[in-house]
Image (cartoon, rainbow, N blue to C red):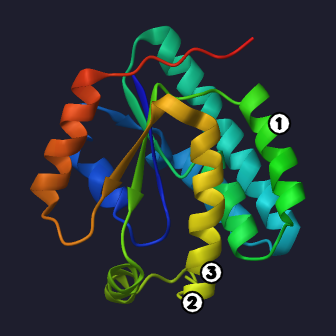
């Protein structure tokens, strides 16, 4: 099973993924993937979005290989995050993002299910400040609203494989138990067409 964990900055994606690391191979933590992500961060604007999509494509190739080999995996921050962040950060217009979504849905490997983490703005900002990441996180309400708008649009297109999980005011154990239940139910992905 290939699982994708998505959500805005500070929603708990990495924390959740690490809880499942013994059972699932985390593609995002592979050295080659980390290098591509770090490389993408050196760019700005549209170029950065395209470099992140290159990184996402590499994640997708590994996901496909794991599917063929029967290896369970988790990917954190795949093309839905890249495109949503590009919209939220004003790097691409909504129409440009819509076109990219069409291309990605037609050509990128698809997970079996998506865990989409959500959390209220104040809690997200608190978490971002606590982790003191060297990467810039825009903590504005405007950006959060743009992210919420476009992520909902993508998740609606992805449909039944998306499971929304709130991390707001909940213990890690409670969140992990909910995600385990979702994984145990499983939702196989079937590409249309």
Return the x and y of residue 133 as percentages of the image width and height.
45, 81
Return the x and y of residue 98 as percentages of the image width and height.
82, 50
Residue 22 seen: no
Return the x and y of residue 155 as percentages of the image width and height.
57, 45
Which mark is on residue 140?
Answer: 2
Measure how far apart labels 1 and 3 are at the Cα level. 24 Å
Q: Identify the image quadrant of residue 159.
A: top right
Look at the numbered disc 2 and give the secondary structure of its residue: loop
Q: Quadrant of the C terminus?
A: top right
- In percent of the image, x 27 and y 63: which residue is there? 167
Precedes in sequence: disc 1 or disc 3: 1
The residue tagged 3 is: 143
Task: Answer above or below: position of 192 versus 169.
Answer: above
The residue tagged 1 is: 103
Task: Answer above or below: position of 30 versus 92.
Answer: above
Measure how far apart labels 2 and 1 are at the Cα level. 29 Å
Of the pair 89 and 135, the residue shown nearer to us: 89
- In percent of the image, x 36 and y 34: which residue is there? 25
Which mark is on residue 179?
Answer: none
Residue 126 seen: yes
Task: Answer above or below: position of 110 versus 189.
Answer: below
Look at the numbered disc 1 and give the secondary structure of its residue: helix
Return the x and y of residue 148 as percentages of the image width and height.
56, 66
Marks 2/3 in contact by CB < 8 Å: the verdict is yes
Disc 3 crowd, CA 10 A, few/some/many (<14, 14-19, 20+): some
- In percent of the image, x 82 and y 72: which residue is there? 91
């Amino acid at each position: 099973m290939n699982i994708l964990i998505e959500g805005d900055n500070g929603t708990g994606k990495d924390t959740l993924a690490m809880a499942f690391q013994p059972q699932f191979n985390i593609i995002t933590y592979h050295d080659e993937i980390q290098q591509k992500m770090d490389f993408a961060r050196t760019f700005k604007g549209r170029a950065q979005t395209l470099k992140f999509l290159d990184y996402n494509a590499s994640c997708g190739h590994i996901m496909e290989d794991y599917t063929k080999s029967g290896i369970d995996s988790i990917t954190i921050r795949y093309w839905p995050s890249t495109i949503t962040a590009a919209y939220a950060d004003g790097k691409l217009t909504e129409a440009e993002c819509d076109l990219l979504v069409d291309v990605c849905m037609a050509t990128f490997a698809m997970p079996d299910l998506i865990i989409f983490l959500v959390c209220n703005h104040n809690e997200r900002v608190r978490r971002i400040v606590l982790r003191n990441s060297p990467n810039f996180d825009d903590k504005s309400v405007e950006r959060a609203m743009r992210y919420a708008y476009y992520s909902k649009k993508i998740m609606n297109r992805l449909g039944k494989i998306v499971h929304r999980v709130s991390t707001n005011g909940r213990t890690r154990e409670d969140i992990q138990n909910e995600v385990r239940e979702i994984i145990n139910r499983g939702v196989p992905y079937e590409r249309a067409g």
